[in-house]
Amino acid sequence: MFEARDQSQHPTAWDDLRRRRALTGATPPAKASATCEAATASKPPAVATASNPMGALTLAEVDAFLTQAARTAADLDNATRIDQIAALEQVKSAAAAAQARLTVDLYTSQREADQGRGLPAGKTSRSVGTQIALARRDSPHKGNRHLGLAKALVAEMPHTLAALTAGIVSEWQATLLVRATACLTQQDRTGVDTLLAPRLGDLSDRRLDAAARAAADRLDPAAAVNRRAKAESDRRVTTRPAPDCMTQLSALLPVKDGVACHAALKAAADTARAAGDPRTRGQVMADTLVQRLTGHTPAVGADIEVRVVMSTDTFLGYGTQSARVPDYGTIPADLAYAWAHAGTPPRHPKNPRSTGDAPTDGAAADVTNIDPDSRSGRAERARVFLRRMFATPDQSRLVAMETGRREFTGLLAEFLNTRDQTCRTPYCDAPIRHHDHVTPHATGGPTTATNGQGLCEACNYLKQHPDWTARPGPHADQPHQVTWTTPTGHTYHSTAPPPLGD
């Protein structure tokens, strides 16, 4: 169990922090002294209790502060503006510390309830983490990180929590310290916290992270080895959209592999440039990467299918509404039109009878948009098959479909992927991994587009917690909506994004 601790239990931490604040930093102008004195009062901030969960502040007082913060006085001098900016930064840190204590209190309360029902700790953590994420308008993944950060600060790092409460370190700096000591035992993590306490507030983010890792390595060298092994096990490749119809491919690799890959691409570029290749060094490196990963020169190789969601106006050539490519993002209307109408009459490899006359057939198109003479040795162009999907005239939703099967497969699964785009849990945006019955199939939920949603793996498992419920929206002629209800009774609405993008 994790319990919130009163910071008065750690007077040494508070005394050191106050003493160092008095001895370091610029002296504020006399006009701003009241602000600075208020921000560095000798009494530590009040700690949340069961009777007063916001500590010294009630929700009404928080609302009043937010209203006051929205107003900026026009008659301030620049020195006072800087002082207020600094004071507000301290407020942000103190708020993060209060959130950490409240998060641990919430976890402790819900863990006691779940334990009495025989639920494993993992389900409690997933449930609480997602509730925190929704409250903070973050993804469930970040919510779990907030929960882990809170547990570490409250239970194992009293000096860092004290510094965060006093506004001496930021939430990000506290995160760096927790992350750097994640491989340690509770005792060793507290030891690092004690070692670094006198330096909190004096180091940049990078130096603080390095100091924490160095201290962790000294206290437990074996844990550092295990941490590196864990990092290597987390190697992965990801993509994210880039401007102007480009995409960024990233690989997280062990350092020796990453350096070797980059060196190989540089060597290939040097060789090509020395032979008179007109492409830039960066272009050769990018093209070589594609060639070595796919086994073919760029845009040459096995046929692939690309789904494009567009309006009928765009398809007919007189619309300007952008189209959307799932797993990428929006593309200009003229490019979507060119893709849809280029090449030979549409022939989808899985539907050879398709003539291209029907709007749901695939269209074979050369989408590389590259001069065929710009690459030496290119023998042919890749065939990219487009599956066109159409939005309603008001561009608010896709056409629905349903099946009598229990599982979401085939075109219905493809429809959910295209409609929902990413995980439908509010603020999640993780890739879709599971196709879920909003109303469970076991309780009579049908296998339809209305009762279906795309979820990431973690959010689908979250729904198995008995205190979480979800229900589909009642109107099939409106954008698809799911209402989530959390264990505390809070409700959140998830609406399918516009099919052609925001």
Image (cartoon, grey):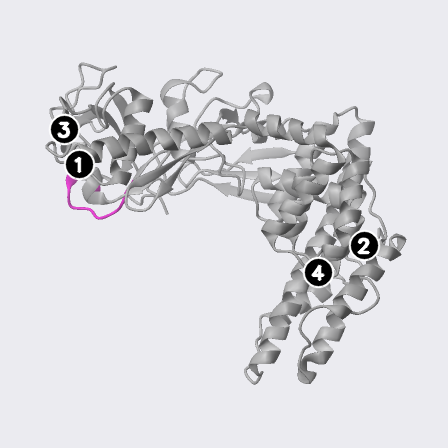
Asked if residue 320 is among those painted magenta in the image, a careful observer would answer yes
Q: Nearer the viewer, residue 371 or 352?
A: 371
Left-right relation of 415 to 65: left
Could you say which disc has been placed on residue 376 in the image? 3
Could you say which disc has been placed on residue 48 in the image? 2
Seen at 22% across and 44% down, the residue is 333
The residues bearing labels 3 and 1 have C-alpha atoms spaced at a distance of: 16 Å
65 up-or-down from 403: above or below: below
Task: Say whether marks 2 and 4 touch (CB < 8 Å).
Answer: no
Nearer to us of marks 3 and 1 is 3
Q: Earlier in the sequence, mark 3 or mark 1?
A: 1
Nearer to us of marks 4 and 3 is 3
- Residue identifier under label 1: 369
Question: Secondary structure under badge 2?
Answer: loop
Tag 1: residue type?
Asn
- Residue identifier under label 4: 168
On the image, the x and y values in percent for residue 23 come to 76, 69
* Residue 46 seen from this side: no
Question: Secondary structure under badge 4?
Answer: loop
Q: Nearer the viewer, residue 487 or 6?
A: 6
